[in-house]
Image (cartoon, helix red, strand yellow):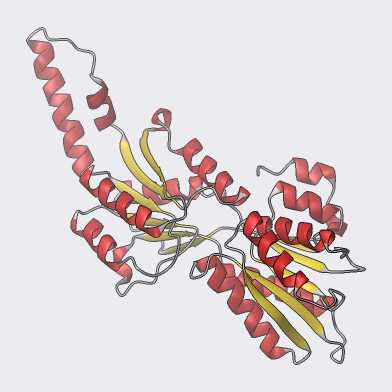
Amino acid sequence: MRRRVIAIAAVLFTLAGSACGARQNPTPDSAYEELITIGMCQVGAESDWRVANSESMKAVFTEERGYRLLFEDARQKQENQISAIRKFIQQQVDYIVLMPISESGWDSVLQEAREADIPVILVDRKVDVSDLGLYTAHIGSDFHREGVQAAAYIAETFQDPTRPVRIVHIQGTLGSTAQLGRTAALEEAAAAHENWEILARLDGDFTQAKSYEVMTSYLQSLPSSDGIDVVYCENDNEAFGAIQALEEHGCTCGPEGVRVITFDATRNALTYCMNGKIALAVECNPLLGPLVEEVIATMEAGRIPEKHNYVEERVFTPEELTAAVIEEREY
């Protein structure tokens, strides 16, 4: 509403100026006032998925499409995200789009946004707040469902209940929605299968470098790496780091060795999968810009959007992948 009032005032001022013989071309500031201003705070650029997600947002929210995008990279620090939101409030943006690093710690700053009458749209991850009215809508993936799909693959692959299934779990950023959902699904499946053993839970923080580091350290602590059946990585970049560590340690990644499971299904991960080094890639679609725009269009029309909006996703195995399929992917 604030944006519309400003735009109307700008139009009236222009008409008045025109009657007095003033310059008719709008100034850059008045041109911006006619745009919907989006304050967007991204986690960072820690993974291929995150980069694709940012590119999707920037492609949608352009001036040509009627938007002014104020984009902040938090560099994987929640305090940077909180500072960015307060900056957006001061700038009186029309909407705040937040990709929260973790679920907790948002009540105060989101209350500030509500008091400023600025809707907050969550993208990718969720927040754990005492009042669900502190955000307008969430757009992203059902991370628990993704984990259930991965666990189902493990159960189908290792059907002998007398054979131990030894799993190394590389977790994503602790406390993030993706980590919580994918971890919970694996833990539930392990509890339901007496022969499953989670050998280690390693903190990969969704990055290739850290996953390589923690996997290398874990392998060096073992008398033999022959006892690992599955490495469950909570995103593609963790899988790349784990595979590098495994292969440097003399392990084979594939049906005859360690089965690596990953989430995201970026083009590079699908190439690994087609070549057999990744056993299962569970899709987590980063192209969420159009869905965010749909939510904003709903609110601009005076309607209430759905609280949670989940994107359609699928799973990939080596048998169904070809170079042509991978080439058609947008990320």
Which quarter of the figure is the C terminus placed in?
A: top right
**Residue beneath the point at 55% across and 50% down:** 50
Relative horizontal placement of residue 127, taking residue 18 as reference (left or right): right
Q: Which quarter of the rendering shows the N terminus?
A: top left
Spot occupied by residue 5 in the image (x, y as percentages of width and height):
16, 38
Q: Is residue 160 above or below residue 44?
A: below
Could you say where residue 53 lies in the image, as x and y percent from the top left? 54, 47
Residue drawn at the location 58% of the way across and 45% of the way down: 52
Residue 314 in view (yes/no): no
Q: Residue furthest right?
A: 256
Q: Give me the residue at 43% from left, 38% from top.
A: 61
Q: Residue at x 83, y 86 (%)?
A: 164
Left or right of residue 226: residue 42:
left
x and y percent of residue 27 in the render?
A: 23, 19
- Foreground of the two, 196 or 2: 196
The answer to whether residue 72 is above or below residue 206 is above
Corner quadrant of residue 39: top left
Q: Is residue 240 left or right of residue 165?
A: left
* Foreground pick, 256 / 270: 256
Q: Of residues 1 and 323, which is closer to you in this image?
A: 323
Q: Residue 232: in sight, yes or no?
A: yes
Residue 319 occupies which quadrant of the picture?
bottom right
